[in-house]
Image (cartoon, coloured by chain):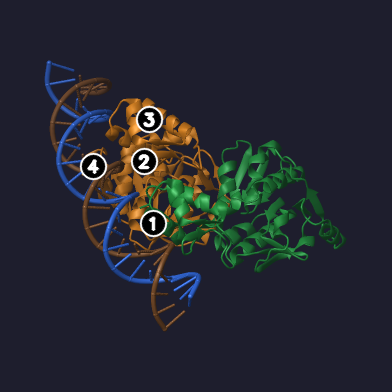
Chain colours: A orange, B green, C brown, D blue
Amino acid sequence: MTPERTRIEAIADFVTQRGEVRIDELAAHFGVSRMTIHRDIDRLAQQGVLRKLHGSVSAQPSGIYESHFRYRSGVASREKQALAEAALSHIQPGQVIMLDDSTTASAVAPLLGACAPLTVVTNSVTASNVLREMDEIDLISVGGQYHRTYNAYIGHLCLNALRGLRTDLLICSASAVQGLSAFIQDQQVVAVKQAMMAAAARKILLLDHSKFGKTALHLLEDLTAFDAVLVTDGLPPAEAVWLEKAGVPLMLVRTTRT
Amino acid sequence: MTPERTRIEAIADFVTQRGEVRIDELAAHFGVSRMTIHRDIDRLAQQGVLRKLHGSVSAQPSGIYESHFRYRSGVASREKQALAEAALSHIQPGQVIMLDDSTTASAVAPLLGACAPLTVVTNSVTASNVLREMDEIDLISVGGQYHRTYNAYIGHLCLNALRGLRTDLLICSASAVQGLSAFIQDQQVVAVKQAMMAAAARKILLLDHSKFGKTALHLLEDLTAFDAVLVTDGLPPAEAVWLEKAGVPLMLVRTTRT
DNA sequence: GTTAGATATCACAATACGTAACAAGAAATT
DNA sequence: AATTTCTTGTTACGTATTGTGATATCTAAC
């Protein structure tokens, strides 16, 4: 899952301490090839810790992220990346799309430049930080109470704001899947996601296969309510067949790149 | 999309700090050719950060548009700091306070840890980025459409959110003061500030003395509507006396030198 | 209105950089 | 022990950035 975490963290520390470092210097300092440095900083950039420039990397100006959040983004990042790329095919330029507070949906944000122009609505601070820098993306943040565990805005203010919006598409995730239903651990987060679903014309759900069989307290919605359910391969084939027979619009996403 | 942003940002800072710079000087200062400088400032001009002239670029405000927040945050920072420190005395632990999108009010944010615990409501991304890191501060972001000129959320969503809130205190600023009234350059920003004023039990206005005598298009409110108007010294004494006679709750703030 | 000088833009070439694909080695799993 | 998975390095190719020189445009002075 997370092999060789030490060097990546060392790079993060090194860069944040120096502000800006050339990639060749990182390669020499850590005694690895440029390619490896590139792969490392790609992951860090995806987490929003660093910014990739041309020939160098710089520390994110707006800052330090919650370690708890950073940890979560590191988990299953390959699966998230694959899901994010697969989700792109559902987006048309000019649309209004919504991202929820999940790290999976936030992984979509850095890729949205390819679909520009777009209007993006989100309660995720991670996604906002990325999208704010993109010229051709119109960013709308739904407000609310800041919750550091999710690095997002939730609560009544958030729900009220969502009531006044209608978007073409929602990209979201869930904590767990049992049977035909998706579950979430936090009650307030459930409320936000349900409000987002009510505001979106089309809804797609991103799930890495580890979510299956897990448990969480609050019901979000049946899987059949989504227009597409993207799942990374690794799901038992029997389960996939069963879900499709039950009417779930399942789409398997290969983790290994094409 | 937007690689190599370091030098471009450095140019933006350099120009906004100096007001107007010749292109040859930029080329010499950054050690690149004129052509490269041209390409850089073309992108900045496209973003509206600065204006291209013939032979030079300027960051001066053009017409009714206020200049970019990066420029504003560099101007009169000593005055802003003094005002922010003075504003602290109006805050009690446990209160719900509101900060507007002004750079002056954002200068208050880093100091709020001293007044914790607090709940802080703001539409400013600058302030949010600071407050998010503070454990004892409860942060509520009013959402809205992101506006890069102010680095804040504005628009209908923002106004609706503010309608549902009531806070103990508002700390805000204005672009200009003429006679007994405060003015703002942008119509949408006026709407947000007025909604904030309507939602706050007490309102204090922070003004560095350079705001006096400036002009701006839209009326915000009379100075007498505030519970305190903090102004940096440098204001002509005659004007101060006149304002106090007119019923303005004026408080002069000494600019402390370091 | 015209012209000289300066400035902006265009087109092309050179260089540096990023990324995909494949192969090899190490670690973990069965 | 065999196999799989993960990580890293190398090569090759596409892309981005920059500089140079030529051409077009602007400004200001006459």
Question: Which is more foreground, mark 3 or mark 4?
Answer: 3
Of all chains, the one bearing label 4 is A
Same chain shared by disc 2 and disc 1: no
Q: Is residue A14 left or right of residue D7?
A: right
Q: Nearer the viewer, residue A110 or B6?
A: B6
Label 3 to label 2, Cα distance in Å? 35 Å
Three-letter residue code for mark 4 = Arg
- Report in which chain the residue with disc 1 lies: B
Which is more N-terminal, label 4 or label 3? 3
Q: Amino acid at mark 2?
A: Gln
Q: Nearer the viewer, residue A50 or B133?
A: A50
Q: Give the label on residue B77, or none.
A: none
- Give SS at disc 2: strand
Are the residues tagged 3 and 2 within 8 Å (C-beta)?
A: no
Q: Which label sits in the foreground, 2 or 1? A: 1
B161 relative position to B39: left or right: right
Classify residue A243 as left or right of residue A186: left
**Which residue is under mark 1?**
B39
Q: Which residue is mark 2?
A: A178
The subunit letter for the residue under badge 3 reads: A
Mark 4 vs mark 2, CA separation in Å:
28 Å
State whether discs 3 and 4 lie on one chain.
yes
**C15 and A79: which is toward the camera:** C15
Discs 3 and 2 carry the same chain letter: yes
